[in-house]
Image (cartoon, rainbow, N blue to C red):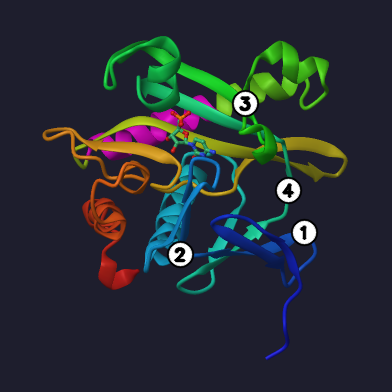
């Protein structure tokens, strides 16, 4: 089989040139990293689960009119996506305090927030993805004010969709991160959801027990990560047998 051109290799995914201009093949690896890649492991089956779960979430977003990069799943580990120019910001939405917000604000994990809070971090591994303000973003030209308004709107729509979906299967969506990219349709720029949506980039807690069903299981050594992700997939009807 002809070798494909590798465009980029990240911590959890590889991008290959797609079959058509404007497309890419996104390959989900089993690699897990945390704390800016200071902690690493290979977790068998994670890539397969995340490929399937990201497909499920992106297809649902398409159904409710939230534009995103997903075109189709190709196989167990690969999906065809639209190629975008990634805006170099991580867009985080929080419904409950956890992780870095709890540390920064001295809030107990699980404290309900008065409303969903959107944060931006600069995508820069060397700097450890620092939190940045809207002032920084527009002043340094990473995005315009219009882009920011569109990013907040997209992030909150994803939050509403994901929160409802999770609530229906007994899971609390504590927070999540998305990445957003630019595409051009006839010189007209649009922003769309890109990268992935999976338990790698969300905090998901069982509503009854508080059990963590996300990457914190790996970050904090709380058990078997594949079991946690499989449980999320099972509840959503993305059964392991279909994975
Ligand atoms: O670490 P922090 O509390 O800021 O993370 C907030 C959310 O963003 C979590 O759901 C985490 O999994 C996600 N995140 C991510 N990639 C990063 C940083 C955070 O997916 N580089």
Q: CA distance from mark 1 to mark 3?
A: 30 Å
- At x 22%, y 51%, the residue is 235
Task: Name the foreground residue: 156 vs 143.
Answer: 143
Mark 4 vs mark 2, foreground winner is 2
Judging by the rendered image, the residue that carries numbered circle 1 is 22
* Callout 3 crowding tier (Cα within 10 Å): few <14, some 14–19, many ≥20: some
Seen as rendered, the residue at the extreme top is 114
SS type, badge 1: loop
First in sequence: mark 3 vs mark 4 = 4
Q: Position of residue 65 (x, y in %)?
A: 53, 39
Q: CA distance from mark 3 to mark 2?
A: 26 Å
First in sequence: mark 1 vs mark 3 = 1
* Callout 4 crowding tier (Cα within 10 Å): few <14, some 14–19, many ≥20: many
Which range is magenta?
155-168
Quarter of the image where one finds residue 175: top left
Tell me the quadrant of the picture where the N terminus can be found.
bottom right
Q: State left or right for residue 12 relative to residue 163.
A: right
Quarter of the image where one finds residue 125: top right
Mark 1 vs mark 3, foreground winner is 3
Task: Name the foreground residue: 80 vs 217.
Answer: 217
Q: State left or right for residue 225 relative to residue 144.
A: left
Q: CA distance from mark 3 to mark 4?
A: 23 Å
Mark 1 vs mark 2, foreground winner is 2
Q: CA distance from mark 4 to mark 2?
A: 24 Å
Q: Which mark is residue 130?
A: 3
Judging by the rendered image, the residue that carries numbered circle 4 is 84
SS type, badge 2: loop
């Amino acid at each position: 089989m002809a070798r494909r051109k590798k465009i980029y290799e990240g911590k959890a995914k590889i991008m290959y040139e797609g079959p058509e201009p404007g497309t890419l093949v996104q390959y989900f690896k089993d690699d897990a990293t945390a704390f800016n890649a200071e902690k690493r492991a290979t977790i068998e089956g994670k890539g397969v689960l995340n490929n399937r779960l990201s497909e499920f979430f992106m297809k649902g977003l398409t159904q409710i009119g939230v534009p995103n990069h997903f075109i189709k799943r190709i196989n167990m580990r690969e999906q065809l996506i639209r190629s975008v120019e990634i805006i170099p910001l991580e867009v985080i939405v929080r419904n409950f305090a956890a992780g870095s917000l709890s540390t920064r604000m001295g809030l107990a994990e699980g404290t309900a927030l008065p409303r969903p809070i959107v944060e931006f971090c600069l995508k820069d591994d060397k700097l450890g993805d620092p939190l940045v303000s809207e002032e920084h973003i527009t002043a340094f030209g990473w995005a315009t004010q219009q882009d920011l308004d569109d990013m907040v709107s997209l992030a909150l729509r994803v939050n509403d969709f994901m929160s409802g979906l999770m609530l229906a299967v007994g899971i609390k969506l504590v927070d999540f991160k998305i990445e957003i990219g630019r595409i051009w349709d006839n010189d007209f720029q649009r922003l769309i959801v890109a990268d992935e949506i999976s338990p790698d980039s969300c905090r998901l807690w069982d509503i009854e027990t508080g059990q963590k069903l996300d990457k914190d299981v790996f970050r904090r050594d709380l058990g078997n990560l594949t079991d946690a992700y499989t449980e999320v997939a099972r509840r959503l009807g993305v059964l392991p047998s279909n994975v």
